[in-house]
Image (cartoon, rainbow, N blue to C red):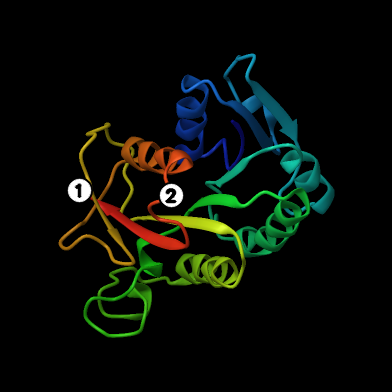
Amino acid sequence: MKILILGATGRVGGQIVTHALRDKHHVTVLVRSPEKIQINNEDLTVMQGNVLNKEDIIRAIHSNDVVISALDTDGTTTLSESMPLIMEAMQKEGIQRIITIGTAGILQSRTTQNILRYQSSESKRKSVRAAQEHHKVYDMLKQSTLDWTIVCPTYLPDGERVGKYRVDRRFLPEGGVEISVPDTAEFTFSQVKSREYIKSRVGIAY
């Protein structure tokens, strides 16, 4: 399978690249700084470019089967500005499957019906800016015809791979407070071969 991974120089994205190459897929990454990719593998294509540049996105998406976005908010609007470009390029290429990393803030609140966690008393974060960015992306994907899955980790320390965690459609697993980067990357990559959470947000925590 041919997989495009965005956000490949980030904590989760870098580990997803490793999983995909280990599984013998051909991986394309679109990065602003190719020198940050320290992997040498014949199945890895490193493209220099920017996710906010329409031509770069079209070039990177061409001939891939699946898109995985591990883009971070980084205090910017890159997430919400890049998603329309990604979706348009996918539709032109006939690519249906996209898996993205979100945040537990955009899962449903357990305490207040019909609102998201970041809008409720469940959220302990002082700033909601990152969650609002992820919310915009969720709304775009929800209105699309794509086969999307948004993996929504809670607090995300680097940590170690545990290999056992709880997942819940639309909600954060009850009492969940953290999930490591390695386990988040592992679960996200597993969705490439899974149809279980199509058109769903998935909460993930220990």
Mark 2: few, some, or many residues within 10 Å (few <14, many ≥20)?
few
* Front residue (pair 102, 66): 66
The residue lying furthest to the right in this view is 55
- The answer to the question of whether label 2 and label 1 lie on touching residues, with beta carbons closer than 8 A, is no
Q: Residues within 10 Å of mark 1 (few under 14, many from 20)?
A: some
- Mark 2 lies on a secondary structure that is loop
Vertical relation: 24 (above or below) 8? above
Residue labelled with disc 1: 206
Q: Could you tell whether 134 is left or right of 188 in the image?
A: right
Label count reads 2
Q: Nearer the viewer, residue 63 or 86?
A: 63
Q: CA distance from mark 2 to mark 1?
A: 22 Å
* Res. 154 in view: no
The residue most toward the bottom is 113
| Amino acid at circle 1 | Tyr
Q: Mark 2 vs mark 1: which is more N-terminal?
A: 2
Q: Residue at x 69, y 28 (%)?
A: 34
Front label number (2 vs 1): 2
170 with respect to 82 (left or right): left
Q: Position of residue 157 (x, y in %)?
A: 31, 43
Residue 50's x, y, as percent? 74, 46
Image vertical order of residue 104 relative to residue 194, above or below: below
Is 181 placed left or right of 205 in the picture? right
**Residue at x-position 71% and y-position 38%:** 32
Q: Which mark is residue 188?
A: none
Residue placed at 20% from the left, 57% from the top? 176
Could you say where residue 86 lies in the image, as x and y percent from the top left?
A: 69, 54
The residue labelled by disc 2 is 195
Describe the element under mark 1 as helix, strand or loop. loop
Q: Is residue 104 visible?
A: yes
Which quadrant of the rendered structure holds the N terminus?
Answer: top right
Q: Position of residue 20 (x, y in %)?
A: 50, 28
